[in-house]
Amino acid sequence: MISAALRIDIERWASRKEDNPVFHLARQGRLTRAMITRYIANVTYMIRLTPGHLRLARDHAVELGDSALSAHYEHKLGEEVGHDLWGEADLASLARLEHRTVYGPSVPAKAPSNTTATSSIEELAAFLTKTIADDPALYLAYLAFTEYVTVLLGPELLALIEDRCGVPKTSMTVIDKHIELDRDHAEEGFGIIDDLVGDPRKLSPLRNALAEMLAHFDRFCEEVTTLDLSDEPNQHVSAA
């Protein structure tokens, strides 16, 4: 089945987690607050774009006469609206933690810096828009990746960041809440792919699209940990 091939590709990518610089530095306790802030900011950026991408995919499916696919995207749209607010709250929490650590609790927290989208994330967003325009069914690969990898790696990553880098899960709720939501969504998503994508000729385009998405995400993780963060305090956020 098509979903089985996509699942294997995602699991193979996840199995190389120690090569991922975000995961690697978190395990070493060297993922800084600046890096974590940038990571959360970019995840939030992509989540903020998700409703728009779902609308594009829904509308294109309607144009192609694929009522089942359009109905699925309409359903997903109802599930995803407003999730970016979790990330916004996390960024505010990270700012408060930074100021509590550096300046003390009596100094008001300023807006966090280094929260603009990285070039790799902007490229991923543009790729998704183009992919949807080419074939709205290919967007299913992105949904499968984001939901399944959150379940596969999210719990361990958050635990490492909390235990070794000093940032509590309460400042990363945009990931933590999706872990709970996506436990069921991931399996449902694979089933939906098999239900809605019956043409075996779609397998290669779906796998190629997924491979490009994974490459963009790899570049994003590299950017998060290597971009110039000199204007940020070079330290971890205290969980105290």
Image (cartoon, grey):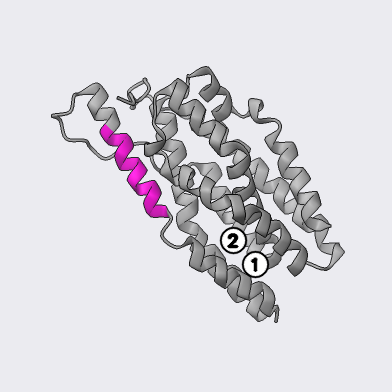
Image quadrant of residue 230?
Answer: top left
**CB under 8 Å between discs 1 and 2:** yes
The disc labelled 1 sits on which kind of residue?
Answer: Ala
Whole-angstrom CA distance, mark 1 to mark 2, is: 6 Å
- Relative depth, front residue between 85 and 218: 85
Tell me if mark 2 has few (under 14), some (14-19) or many (20+) residues whose alpha carbon lies within 10 angstroms of its own: some
Residue 57 vertical position relative to residue 226 in the rendered view, above or below: below
Q: Position of residue 194 (x, y in %)?
A: 77, 63
The disc labelled 2 sits on which kind of residue?
Answer: Thr
Q: Which residue is mark 2?
A: 129
In the image, is 212 to the left or to the right of 25?
right
Task: Give the quarter of the figure containing the C terminus.
Answer: top left
In the image, is 40 to the left or to the right of 206?
left
Residue 97 vertical position relative to residue 54 in the rendered view, above or below: above
Question: Which element is circle 2 on?
Answer: helix
Q: Which residue is mark 1?
A: 133
In the image, is 190 to the left or to the right of 111?
right
Task: Give the quarter of the figure containing the N terminus.
Answer: bottom right
Q: Residue at x 76, y 50 (%)?
A: 6
Q: Residue at x 65, y 26 (%)?
A: 19
Q: Position of residue 225 (x, y in %)?
A: 50, 28
> In the rendered structure, which segment of residues is drawn in magenta?
84-96
Image quadrant of residue 113?
Answer: top left
Q: Residue at x 81, y 57 (%)?
A: 2
- Relative depth, front residue between 5 and 135: 5
In the image, is 126 to the left or to the right of 116?
right
- Relative depth, front residue between 231 and 154: 154
Residue 132 vertical position relative to residue 116 in the rendered view, above or below: below
